[in-house]
Structures are given as structure tokens and as C-alpha cells.
Amino acid sequence: MPNVRLTKSSVDRLSATNRDTIYWDDGLPGFGLRVKTTGVKSFLVQYRNKQTGRSKRKTLGRYGPTLSLGAAREIARALLADVVRGADPVADAQSLRHSPTVNSLATQYMTEHAEPKKRPGSVRNDRSMLDRYILPKLGDLKVIEVTHQHVQKLHNQMRDTPYQANRTLALMSKMFELSVRWGQRSDNPARGIEKFPEEKRDRWLSDGELQRLLVALSEHPNQVAANAIRLQLLTGARIGEVLKAKWEDFDLDRAVWTKPSHHTKQKRREHLPISSATCDLLAAMKAGASPESRWLFPGRSPDQPYKDLKKFWSSVTTSAGLQDYRIHDNRHTHASHLVSSGLSLPIVGRLLGHTNPSTTQRYAHLADDPLRQAVDVMGKKISGGST
């Protein structure tokens, strides 16, 4: 394997022999030209892996109109510089070639993480975000090819729906975090991307609105669904927890609702004290309940719970004259009335099952009401004594 000074004229002059021959460049060690017996000329680099000591060779491309000597030398110089820094171009190329696509990663994420570990509603949300936003843009890319810029661009394109954009970003971050654990890449390209500001919903019912809702519930012909809403208002539970509740979960003597871990958002068992009004509601429901069903709110089949309250909720809120009020906002109503009555934010957070104190902090301004009433007591005394 002779050493020569590779120039355009020398490369053009080199001709085929009776065997493949490599001519190494005197000017750039590790860079060479291979001339095959057919006369085809290709540039290559040869280097030694710094970690293993193994010698490796990588073909850069065929000499011709699309790859000149100068271009090949620049590519070789960059690759050999990467080798000095510890890279292995051959191994990197093999990793890229065998790397799974984002489509494959999404399938693995759903089957190995989402479906075994997340609630059915969360699994459906993940599937929807994958199908609508992530896979149409990134699905055909290799996992190892996805860059910070790819993720940033997708997130920016969803700026008009900031809440959905941030949930999609969180899903991508989780997927790529798992891809690192699964050995598919070395970093998470979604890390460090700033989320869009979100305006939290602060919708709950005033005393007057709450009374209108209670009247609408009492007048509705579907009292099974009405009792589900009453239980939600009394406990502040998520509607999914209410509809999936079983009679065995309640101890009316001790006034405790034990929520199974597979029903709660935090995937942990919760013991929730319930009020005497809640016990009265449950006792009345129990008296008229079918002995065939374990569910508080059985559906059409006694062995299945009530599935959906959308039509019922639309009817009730229309009758009550409530605008822009979702069924989930009943949790906010429950919490806001507790805080306004003087209960501390940590206590309310525990009743609602919040694991992060900042989640309950949205009600902080309501805690001023009982304090303001307290300070007004002395104010009235002073004002009254000075007149």
C-alpha cells in the first residue's frame, strides 16, 4: 500500500492493477484512495479506536463529479479529528443504520410504559398526541437522528394551543428519556425546551351558582347521575374516582372512603374521611341499591360502572344557567369553598389528593377572606368606639 502525495493530477493518473490497491496520502495520515481492479476509485479513512485499539476503515465515497479530492480530504480531516476526540465513525454509522425509528419508539413506549403503568384515560391521551402531532412530524426519523431543533420546532408550531403543546412536549421528553435508558441514544433532545405559559382555569361556583346547580340536580329525572355529582361536590373527588367507586370501598361507621390505587391519579391508595352529609347520601343510595351490583353507580349492566355523564352534565348546567363550567370544575368548587371557610391550603391539598403543594396554591388568594373577616372585628370595635 504505497504512500503518495494525493493531488488531482496524481489521482487522475492512477490506474487499475491486477488487485485492489490503496494509496495513502502523505499530507493527511489516515486518508487514502482505493483503486479497484475495475478502475473504480474511492476515498477512505483508516483510524484506530481510542478505547479498544481496533483498526477500522470507512469508505467516504466514489471519486468523481459528486466527490472531489478536496471535498473528500475535508470530510476525512473532520472524521479523523472526531477520532482524536474519542469518536468512532464506523460504529456511529452502524448505530445509525440499526437505530429504531421514532415510530418504533412510540410503539415500545406504549406497550412497555404507558399501557402497563398509566390510567386508561392517560393512555388514550398519549395515543392521540402521538397520532396527531408527534408521529406525522418525527415518526420516520431514526431515534438517534432527532435533535433539540426538531423538538423545538414541533413545540413552536403548536404555540396557538399552549396547553396541548406543553403536554406534547412532556410526552416527547418522557419517550426520549426512556430511549436513553433503553440504549437507543445518549441524550434527551427534549430537555431544556421552555414551556409556553399556561393560564390555569379558575372557575368555581359562587354560593348562588352552587344553589342553582343543586336545584337542577334535584329536578333532573336521572337521580343516579345526580347522586354522582352530589358525591363529587361533597368529596372533591375526580369524576372517574366517583363513577368507579364500589360499596366495599366505604366504611360508613368510620366515615372513610378508601380509594384503590388503580383508581387514583397518583397510583396510590388513599383514605379519605367523609362528612356526615356524605354518609347520609350514601346510606340513602345503599337503601335503594341493587344487591346484584358492587358499584355505587352501575351502568346498564350491573357488573359495569356508569361510563359517561356528558349528556347529563350538559342538561344540568343548562338548567342551572351555568356558563363555561366543566364537570372537573366541581373539584375547584369544593376546594375554594373549603379555603374560603378558613381551612389551610395543606389540609385542602391532602383532601384533594394533591402531591405537589403548588397545585393547591391556586386557591391561596381565597385564604385571605377569613383573615380579612378577623381583622375587621377589631376595626369595627375601634370605629364603633370612636364615633
Image (cartoon, rainbow, N blue to C red):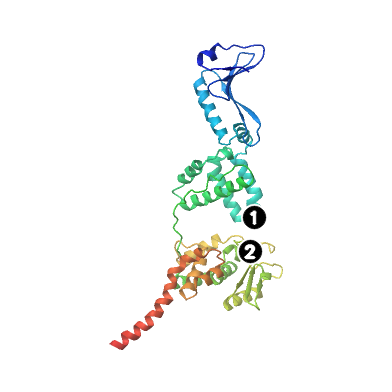
Question: Can residue 288 be seen in the rendering of this structure?
Answer: no
- Tell me where residue 311 appears, x and y as whole percent: 54, 60
- Tell me where residue 96 appears, x and y as whole percent: 60, 35
Instruction: Measure how far apart labels 1 and 2 are at the Cα level.
Output: 12 Å
Check the image and name the residue furthest to the right.
Answer: 292
Q: Is residue 75 left or right of residue 38?
A: left
| Residue 32 in which image quadrant | top right
**Which residue is denoted by mark 1 in the rendering?**
117
The answer to which of 288 and 8 lies nearer the viewer is 8
Question: Can residue 36 be seen in the rendering of this structure?
Answer: yes
**Upstream in sequence: badge 1 or badge 2:** 1
Q: Is residue 371 left or right of residue 387?
A: right
Q: Is residue 47 above or below residue 264?
A: above
Task: Give the amino acid at mark 2.
Answer: Arg
The N terminus is located in which quarter?
top right
Q: Marks 2 and 1: in contact by CB < 8 Å? A: no
**Which residue is denoted by mark 2 in the rendering?**
268
Q: Which mark is residue 61?
A: none
- Tell me where residue 114 appears, x and y as whole percent: 63, 52
Q: Which residue is at a point 42% across and 69% down the rendered structure image?
A: 365
Task: Give the amino acid at mark 1.
Answer: Lys
Q: Is residue 45 left or right of residue 204?
A: right
The answer to which of 101 and 18 lies nearer the viewer is 18
Q: Is residue 55 above or below residue 197?
A: above
